[in-house]
Image (cartoon, grey):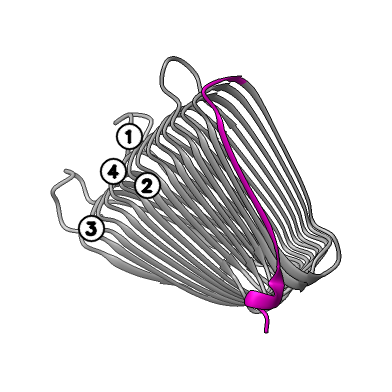
Amino acid sequence: MMGSVLTAQVSSTVKQSNGPILGPGSTANFHQSGKFIKSEVDQTGALNLANINQVGYGLLSDADQWGYKNDAGVEQTGKGQYSKVKQEGKTNLSRTTQAGALNKSVTIQQSPLLSYSDGNQSYVDQHGIYLDSKVRQKGTENFSDVQQSGAGHESSVTSIGHGNRSNVNQTSHEKNVSDVDQYGAYNMSAVDQGKGYNYSDVDQKGFKNTSSVVQVYGKNSSTVLQNGDFNASSVNQTAGKRNKSKVEQEGNGSTSNVDQIKGSNDSYVYQYGAGHYSGNVSNVSQKYGNDNKSKVYQIGKKNTSSVAQEGPWVDNISLVVQKGAYNTSNVNQFGTHGVNVSSVSQHGIGHTANVTQASGALIFP
């Protein structure tokens, strides 16, 4: 079926093949409304387009495209909808929009036959409550963007390859969950969550990967696990209390930055350097609050730990443990009331420890 256009109004299946991979593209349009209606489209070749629009309850959309430069767009409104887009090949585009409740979106972009699918793009936009998004990408320089507005959402992104980018935005309401897994090198992950009670889990295996987590208001939890050399992690938890941050980095030349604002926050950083070169850096900043806790563990050589705790009411605790050689620890605690506690334990040779505890009168007049 060469360069054809089909429109379906009820449950239906459409298969289109444009012959040679360089042939003209086909187009499939679905417009459906009602309950428990299913649409299926199977397109092979290049420059194919699938547009699926569904309104109702319990609707199912399944789009399968093989080739390159294919485009699949799914728009679902209602409750209990399910969308699946599977694209095998290169430079494909997937667009999924869901509004309502209890909807689920699955996007798969990969190519077993070509080993890797390069430069694919996935966009998921969900509005409502209790929505679920799963994105799986395999290859190089893929891009994933998940936007979820509302409460009780879950987002899961898995990238395998190099130079992949993932963005997850869950800032409008509370109690959202984000899970990002990236395997390879030069990958980037950015997670933004708002309103509190959110959970973020980022797992990156490889080298020169970057993770950024921003959580607003209180009672958020962030876990970042990075395995490899020259990775970077940034966790920013602002405008709330009782946040928890956990960063574990195994490798050399990695950097961890944790910023927590207001009180009763908890930060845990573990850095393990293997071989003759470590050079890991940990920076923890806890400001404008009291009852904060910071724990830093570094194993290896030439590591640096910096902890800054400030607030008008203090009772902050800092614990630093370093094992190896030529490590440096810097602890600064300031406040006007309460008691700060700092413990630095260094095992090995050539270490340096600097601890400053001062009245906040100079900082908080």
**Image quadrant in which the N terminus is located:** bottom left
Which numbered disc flags the more N-terminal residue, 2 or 1?
A: 1
Q: Which mark is residue 118?
A: 4
Residue at numbered disc 1: 116
Residue 25: horizontal and vertical position, in percent? 22, 59
Q: Residue at x 66, y 73 (%)?
A: 194
Give the Cα separation between the discs numbered 3 and 2: 23 Å
The kind of residue on which mark 2 rests is Asn
Q: Does the magenta-highlighted stretch encompass residue 73?
A: no
Asked if disc 1 and disc 4 are in contact, CB closer than 8 Å, the reply is yes
Q: Is residue 228 above or below residue 156?
A: above
- Label 4: element kind: loop
Q: Check disc 2 and report the residue beneath it.
A: 164
- Per the model, the C-alpha gap separating discs 4 and 3 is 16 Å
Classify mark 3: helix, strand or loop.
loop
Q: Which residues are magenta?
A: 348-365
Residue 91 or residue 232, whichever sits in front: 232
Disc 1 marks a residue whose amino acid type is Tyr
Residue ID for mark 3? 47
How packed is label 2: few (under 14 Cα within 10 Å), some, or many (20 or more)?
many
Q: Is residue 354 magenta?
A: yes
Give the CA separation, mark 1 to mark 3: 19 Å
Mark 1 or 3: in front is 1
Front position among marks 2 and 1: 2
